[in-house]
Image: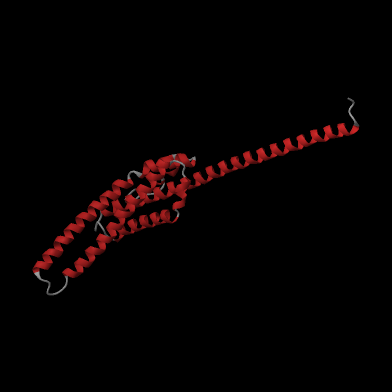
């Protein structure tokens, strides 16, 4: 059967339809792939930025705690200088707590858990040192009260010794915990695409008592 002119038009239009459909499918697939690739790149960039932020924060906290440990060896162990270093370290932990959403960008679940755990293990004993220091000041004031009975004085003095011992234990725990920060910073350095040496702030920050 001979084909009519209308039949050729139909075949031509049908072929054009499939060309348009194929082009639309390819464009859609290209858009999806491009969107996924862009999302992957953006997520990786955010992870690198978060890792760098957390690494610098942890490095700063560790250095401040080392400063506090050095200061504790000179003069009043828990004098103003030691406490100022600890307060500075606590403020850095506050920065972490205010920006904690950064930790969820890190894909390594174990690394996220280690970071959060070490922040908690540092925050609580640091707060404990402050609480103990305040309690000792209050008790010392009570001991100066005129007419204080001997039995009450003995009780307050025993409380002072207990609080001092607990404070020393807490401070030791702070220093011990801060030593674990180096490994965390090394892991975060890898996640940020940096070398661990580039984030070792103690290489460029002079500690008290060190010669320039």
Residue farthest front in this picture: 1
Left or right: residue 21 versus residue 193 is right
- In front of the other: 144 or 207: 144
Seen as rendered, the residue at the extreme bottom is 146
- 116 versus 27 height, above or below: below
Residue located 22% across and 55% down the image: 166
Q: Is residue 212 visible?
A: no
Q: Is residue 97 visible?
A: yes
* Left or right side of 32 for 173: left
Please state which of residues 212 and 106 is positioned toward the viewer in this rendering.
Answer: 106
**Residue in the image at 83% along x and 32% along y:** 11
Q: Nearer the viewer, residue 204 or 139?
A: 139
Q: Quadrant of residue 23?
A: top right
23 vs 105, left or right, is right
What residue lies at 73% left-to-right and 35% top-to-bottom? 22
Residue 199, image x and y in percent? 44, 44
Tell which residue pokes out farthest to the top in this image. Answer: 1
């Amino acid at each position: 059967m001979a084909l009519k002119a209308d039949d050729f038009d139909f075949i031509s239009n049908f072929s054009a339809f499939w060309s348009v459909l194929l082009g639309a499918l390819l464009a859609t697939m290209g858009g999806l792939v491009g969107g996924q690739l862009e999302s992957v790149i953006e997520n990786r960039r955010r992870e690198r930025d978060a890792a760098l932020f957390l690494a610098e924060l942890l490095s700063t906290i560790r250095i401040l705690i080392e400063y506090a440990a050095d200061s504790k060896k000179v003069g009043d162990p828990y004098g103003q200088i030691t406490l100022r270093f600890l307060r500075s370290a606590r403020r850095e932990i506050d920065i972490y707590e205010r920006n904690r959403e950064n930790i969820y960008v890190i894909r390594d679940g174990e690394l996220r858990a280690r970071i959060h755990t070490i922040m908690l293990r540092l925050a609580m004993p640091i707060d404990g040192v402050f609480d103990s220091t305040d309690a000792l000041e209050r008790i010392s004031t009570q001991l100066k009260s005129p007419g204080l009975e001997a039995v009450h004085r003995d009780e307050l003095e025993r409380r002072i010794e207990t609080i001092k011992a607990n404070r020393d234990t807490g401070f030791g725990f702070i220093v011990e915990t801060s030593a674990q920060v180096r490994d965390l910073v090394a892991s975060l350095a890898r996640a940020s695409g940096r070398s661990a040496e580039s984030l070792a702030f103690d290489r460029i920050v002079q500690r008290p008592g060190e010669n320039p």
